[in-house]
Amino acid sequence: MERVLVTPIPEGEVRALRVGDVVYLSGLLVTARDEAHRTMLEKGAPLPLEGLAIFHCGPVVSKKGEEWQVVAAGPTTSARMELFAAEFLRRFKPRVIVGKGGMGEQTLQALAEVGAVYAHFTGGAGVLAAQAIQRVREVHGLEELGIPEAIWVFEVERFGPLVVAMDAHGRSLYKDLSAQVERNMEAIRARIRGEVKR
């Protein structure tokens, strides 16, 4: 199923999503990498995040006059944020986390508790992502954190496609895939053992 989610996204709309759904985002998309997560947990978020989408991204930007232009905005590996994600979700209640590679069990539990999803964006498609960014609304922590780690607030239109990879019902494509890989590996090992015995 394909849906467009407009921020602020109601909790019920997110709880209706299931692993495998394809979604697009319109509205506000806020970047946060390791240091941004740490900073917001220590000092508070620079804007209300409830109902918004968080993007694990260090954008490539340039400044033209007083305006920031996003050149590329590809996802960074989300596992790096696992240390912060559960507390971040519970405290700030964003409804969508966008990244690549998936996250762990603590995040999966917090997604179910809060009513949020993790959505996968294809790595290497940073220019495609930038095309959906209408403008940079604001940036926080630029001097302290630097461009990649700063908290960028983008206005986006049909940002995606994103695949819901972890939902608010405890399902995870990554867990399902890992279990399938293990079943396949066991079948291969059994076949190898059978051939060796011959």
Image (cartoon, helix red, strand yellow):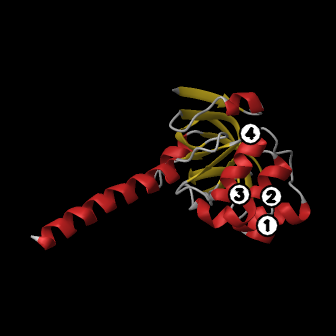
* Residue marked by disc 3: 32
* Residue marked by disc 2: 87
> Which one is closest to the eye, mark 1 or mark 3?
1
**Number of other residues with Cα within 10 Å of mark 1, as a class: few under 14, some 14 to 19, many 20 or more:** some
Q: CA distance from mark 1 to mark 2?
A: 10 Å
* Residue marked by disc 1: 38
Q: Are marks 4 and 3 in contact (CB under 8 Å)?
A: no
> Which one is closest to the eye, mark 4 or mark 3?
4
Q: Amino acid at mark 1?
A: Arg
Q: Is residue 66 above or below residue 15?
A: below
Q: Amino acid at mark 3?
A: Ala
* Residue marked by disc 4: 115
> Which one is closest to the eye, mark 1 or mark 2?
2
Q: Nearer the viewer, residue 109 or 141?
A: 109
Q: Position of residue 53 (x, y in %)?
A: 70, 43
Q: Are marks 4 and 1 in contact (CB under 8 Å)?
A: no
Looking at the image, how many numbered discs can be counted on the residues?
Answer: 4
